[in-house]
Image (cartoon, rainbow, N blue to C red):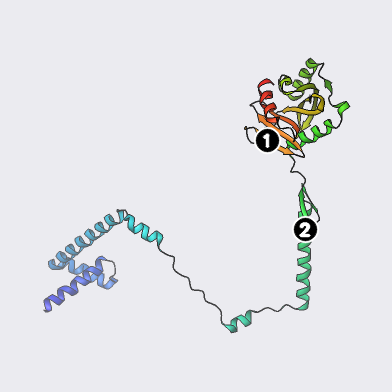
Amino acid sequence: MKASASSSALEQRISAFLDGEANEHERQEIEALLVNEPQARALHDNLKRGTDYGRRVFDDAMKEPLPLELVRTIKNAPLPRRAIRLPDDKKRQALSFKPSRTQALVACLLSLCLGGGIGYALGTQPGSTRLGGSEVQLDSRDWLDDVVAHYRLYTRLPDRLVEIGADRPGDILAWLTTGTGIAFRIPDLSQSGLTFAGARLFTADNRPSGLLLYRRGDEGEIIAITFSKTRPDTNKPVEDIRADTGLVSWSTPLATYVVVGPSSAADLDEIAAKAAGLI
């Protein structure tokens, strides 16, 4: 019994020695035992082999990937609740702040200056203004708005509808090709009841644009075709109505074209289809 207890105590001492937990005095005693006692050396070697084997097994286990089910369990586990510690009434009363009259006045002045500065910064932003409490954007126009504005202006000047008349087609081709950088032909739209009247050059969204104007029979209705190098967001034909003016636009790799006329004209899309194949 005593031998067994002594062996167990020796095993514990050698285990502590191998694990680096023995103090200096115990370490020296174990080293002396290992030199002089064959039984202690054998026990030391067995424990060391067991320790090395355990470490290898542990290292191999750490290299193995985690089971997918365990990963899912860890990932989907709810987060632990965090306790919030509220101060007691005495501390809350101690933390309460009562500004003096001077401090309150300074805070009011700072708030007034800050609010005025923010309001001034917002009010001086370019491209917007306020009317009756509502903000109106000044830069929301696009190139089609310019097209509509010029069309409406010229149709109200029947005596000055064109700059170069239909009797000078060569001059129109040379003038608009040079001005816009787009080669084109003057479409013959007589099958749609339209007679070519002449041409103009104007700017839409700061780009030069050509304008071919047609009259419809005795009704005096004006239909126009405009073209420029403006590139829209889409290449698909787009139909739109702005300010009682109908628009049908389409694009090619070289230019964008728009047929413009009164919104009451029901054949603008047909005219655009014919013009697209002729211009």
**Which residue is at the front of the view, 153 or 18?**
153
All told, the count of numbered labels is 2
Does residue 63 lie above or below 105 as drawn?
above
Q: Quadrant of residue 213?
A: top right
Query: Which residue of the protein is positioned furthest toward the bottom in this rendering?
Result: 90
Mark 1 or mark 2: which is in front? 1
Query: Which residue of the protein is positioned furthest toward the right in this rendering?
Result: 159
Which mark, residue 1?
A: none
Of the 4 image quadrants, the one containing the C terminus is: top right
Q: Residue 179, how many percent across, how many down?
A: 77, 23
Q: Residue 88, how many percent across, how many down?
A: 56, 82
Q: In the figure, is residue 277 to the left or right of 206? A: left
**Which residue is at the front of the view, 221 or 36?**
221
**Which residue is at the front of the view, 105 or 244?**
244
Alpha-carbon neighbours of circle 2 within 10 Å: few (<14), some, or many (≥20)? few
Does residue 186 lie above or below 241 as drawn?
above
Question: How much space separates mark 1 and mark 2, taking CA atoms?
Answer: 41 Å
Kind of residue at disc 1: Glu
Of the 4 image quadrants, the one containing the N terminus is: bottom left
Kind of residue at disc 2: Gly
Alpha-carbon neighbours of circle 1 within 10 Å: few (<14), some, or many (≥20)? some
Disc 2 is placed on an element classified as helix
| Mark nearer the N terminus (1 vs 2) | 2
Q: Residue 173, how many percent across, how many down?
A: 76, 18
Disc 1 is placed on an element classified as strand
Query: Which residue of the protein is positioned furthest toward the front in this rendering?
Result: 218
Provide the residue designation for mark 1: 239
Provide the residue designation for mark 2: 119
**Which residue is at the front of the view, 179 or 6?**
179
